[in-house]
Amino acid sequence: MTDRLSSSLWGKWPICRFLTGFLLFSGAYALINQLLLTQSILYRAAAYDYVSAGLATLSFTVQAITLLAATVLLPRRWFIALLALTTISASVNVIYGQIVGDILDLQKTGWLLTEARQAGEAAAEFAAPLALALGKLMIALALLVGTRRLLHDHVRRLTRDRLAGKTLFAAIIALVVAPSFLWTPLGLHPLAAERNVYSFAATIWTADPPPPRALVTQVPDKKTDIVKIVWLIDESISYDGFTTIIRPDLAAMGIVDFGEAASMGHCSTPSNVALRSGVNVRSVSNKTDLRRTPSIWGYAAKAGYATQMIDGQVSGPPQNQLLAPEQALIDDYQNAAQGIRTDLAIARLLNARLKNDDKQFTYAILRGVHFQYRDHYPEGALPEGSSTQAQYEKAISYSKDGFFETLLQGVDRSKVAIFYASDHGQHIKDGITPHCSGSPVASEFAVPLIAFLPPQIQQRYAASPPGGRSLSQLFPTTLTLMGYDTAYASQNYDNILTMPTARYVWFGRGIVPVKSGGTIDIQAGTTFPAR
């Protein structure tokens, strides 16, 4: 009875069929492109940028019409292929947007590819937003299928099957695909979520190979007694977490504590790339390509130090945009992931090497406490259902239990300089992204920065009041300890750590240009990032 009534209604008023189909499609398109539509049209209009809002509306309209035409007109097999392609691209956008709260673009897609190994941890940590994203996606796909069921046969009947044939189908597919690869060269934007991943991926895969690193031309101008320099870069240790959990155990170890420091990124990749590359904070811009800088490896080699990198987070290919031209500069690259006691194993490894007389610079990435935090301490160490804060504190405590004691045991510290920091901070709160969020807060940048220095050097660094420091200062400070001229290091990078930073600089996910001459994601200012 209901089916006959529905059929009669559609037959009597076909406009109702078309209107309902259009509404179903509009709902699907809005769900898939929610963040893009909001930021590109609503936010632009709210800022009185009506030209940009109008152009974005036109861009979405053209792309939506092509998708609607394909949904309604294509034969079943072709429609299934279209739906599969739409699902792949839309799912990446919707899931990313739901978890991070930001839109996907070319640079962020490149970042996603480098962080693919963290997908499992992210899925477990953000199960609720992931489920919500998948729910949105399923509703959108159901609405697209509903649109087709309402309109496909009816349109064919109305046109007496004239809208058929391989030529027309090929033309429709061409129209669907064309914006993916023509919009950017034509200067049109934005690309819609159902298609942008393919354009971004094609651009990344066809990008120019990474450029070679510049050679170091500066020569150390003074002799140094320091034979071992170590950078310990921890993972996800906030300044507050360090101060309350780690710092009390270091009070008797003779450290220089520079206080709250600013990382150069709220994600691991940009932070580590900037640290290794060195940043001229006074002149860096969105056209800077950090893949071309001499890097810490070049300076260390020029000063006679063997170079070593230890990564406690991977057991396969390098992470954090460690590209081939840069890796070739490292004398010894070593994967060191060994489960939840990885950091203690690294401490033992470094302790043995700190006791020989070879000149060596070591960059050690610790396992730390990247979410999900319960993966970083033994099962049963906390009651089930413990808060995120409790899990985080337990993870830090377990991660660094015995680490510094093991590292320094029996070491002659008169010839050793060790710096400890974290790649980024954490914003600890249930149900939110703790770092690398779409709208970062200051706690995502706030990290510890301490040093174990020879007595003859330590007093000079300890005399300056703590605070106002940035991890950008680690690079020039290390150059001076290697024997390079202090004025050169400060002028070409940043103030050394005897004084505050010359300028805060921080990078987003797109820290390197995807193509030659492209731009990067960077911000700078005189105040602490996001504060």
Image (cartoon, rainbow, N blue to C red):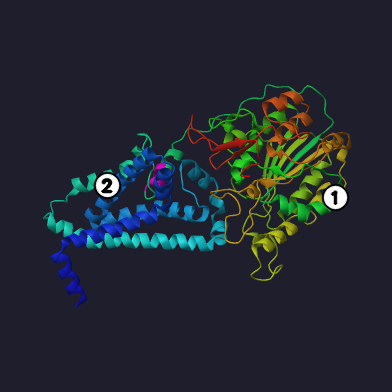
For the point 53% across and 63% down, the residue is: 127
Placement of the C terminus among the 4 image quadrants: top right
Q: Would you say residue 318 is visible in this rendering?
A: no
For the point 58% across and 37% down, the residue is: 523
Asked if residue 196 lies left or right of residue 21, the reply is right
Q: Nearer the viewer, mark 2 or mark 1?
A: 1
Q: Nearer the viewer, residue 470 or 130?
A: 470
Q: Secondary structure at mark 1?
A: helix
Q: Would you say residue 313 is visible in this rendering?
A: yes
Q: Secondary structure at mark 2?
A: helix
- For marks 2 and 1, give the CA distance: 67 Å
Taking 77 as reference, is 311 above or below it? above
Percent from the top left, x then y, of residue 415? 85, 36
Numbered range of the magenta stretch = 195-199
- Badge 2 is on which residue? 173
The image quarter containing residue 185 is top left
Of pointers 2 and 1, the one earlier in the residue sequence: 2
**Residue type pointed to by label 2:** Ile
Percent from the top left, x then y, of residue 4? 17, 74
- Badge 1 is on which residue? 251
